[in-house]
């Protein structure tokens, strides 16, 4: 199975900051990488698919990059609504494994 | 466009529960569907999936033989029958829509709010 590792596991930032979350795959997944945002008490929401493509309705302050094994999610500038937990997920194999999550705190 | 959930609750080890969800604002019958769970303080793991007409299913190894995913497309509904439950099955369970975006890239693009399942003696 493909293992997905996110760093950091938690991150403190302020409104207006630029933050970057890293996701690494245990093997090459090309650009089959999704990012999700989860707020307390709610199901995750898809932000980015194919490593770089914003899902419809997602603000342009979110961006994704990377291919192969190393990926990043960048948020700039941070807005109050962005404080949440973020997960990466590989979609290269049908195990569709997730990273362990990164919690973005004020 | 939402996924609306029902079912869940608390049961003892060895017990059973049935989860249900329905598509609100979309025809669930057009899509593969997944159940994904999240144990307290833990990450996300898919446990079961079903194709659009219900002819093909798949399960995570740790629920195989205990959980059964099914669907009723006429009623726009998805189900997860969970038997022989143990404490390790305690989690929030999400009913999730699967799509191929950009005609090539699999993603879980619509999630329900989550159904709480607690297995405790």
Image (cartoon, helix red, strand yellow):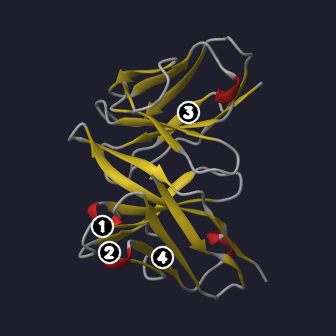
Tell me if residue A60 comes above or below residue B112 in the rendering. Answer: above
Return the residue at label 3: A6
> The disc numbered 1 marks a residue on which chain?
B
Residue B51 image-quadrant placement? bottom left
Same chain under badges 2 and 3? The reply is no
Same chain under badges 1 and 4? The reply is yes
Tell me if residue B27 comes above or below residue A37 in the rendering. Answer: below
Return the residue at label 2: B73
Residue B55 image-quadrant placement? bottom left
Disc number lying in front (1 or 3): 1
Disc 3 versus disc 4: distance between alpha carbons?
30 Å
Mark 1 or mark 2: name the one nearer the start of the chain: 1
Mark 1 and mark 2 residues within 8 Å of each other at the beta carbon: yes
Return the residue at label 4: B80
Disc 1 versus disc 3: distance between alpha carbons?
34 Å
- What residue do we see at 71% from left, 51% from top? B41
Residue A39 is situated, as x and y percent measured from the top left of the image, at 66, 42
Instruction: Give residue B29's mark.
Output: 1
Residue A23 is situated, as x and y percent measured from the top left of the image, at 49, 30
């Amino acid at each position: 199975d493909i293992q997905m590792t996110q760093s950091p596991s938690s991150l403190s930032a302020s409104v207006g900051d630029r933050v970057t979350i890293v996701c690494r795959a245990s093997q090459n997944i090309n650009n089959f990488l999704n990012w999700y945002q989860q707020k307390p008490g709610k199901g995750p929401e898809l932000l980015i698919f194919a490593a770089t493509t914003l899902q419809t309705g997602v603000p342009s302050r979110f961006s994704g990059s990377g291919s192969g094994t190393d990926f990043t999610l960048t948020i700039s500038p941070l807005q109050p609504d962005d404080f949440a937990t973020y997960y990466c997920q590989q979609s290269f194999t049908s195990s569709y494994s997730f990273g362990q999550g990164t919690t973005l705190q004020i | 466009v939402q996924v609306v959930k029902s079912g869940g609750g608390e049961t003892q080890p060895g017990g059973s529960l049935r989860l249900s969800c329905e598509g609100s604002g979309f025809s669930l019958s057009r899509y593969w569907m997944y159940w994904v769970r999240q144990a307290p303080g833990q990450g996300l793991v898919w446990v079961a999936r079903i194709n659009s007409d219900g002819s093909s299913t798949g399960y995570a190894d740790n629920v195989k033989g205990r959980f059964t995913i099914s669907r009723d497309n006429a009623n726009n509904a998805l189900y997860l029958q969970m038997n022989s439950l143990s404490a390790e099955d305690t989690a929030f369970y999400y009913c999730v829509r699967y799509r191929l975006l950009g005609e090539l890239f699999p993603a879980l693009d619509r999630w329900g709010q989550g159904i709480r399942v607690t297995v405790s003696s």
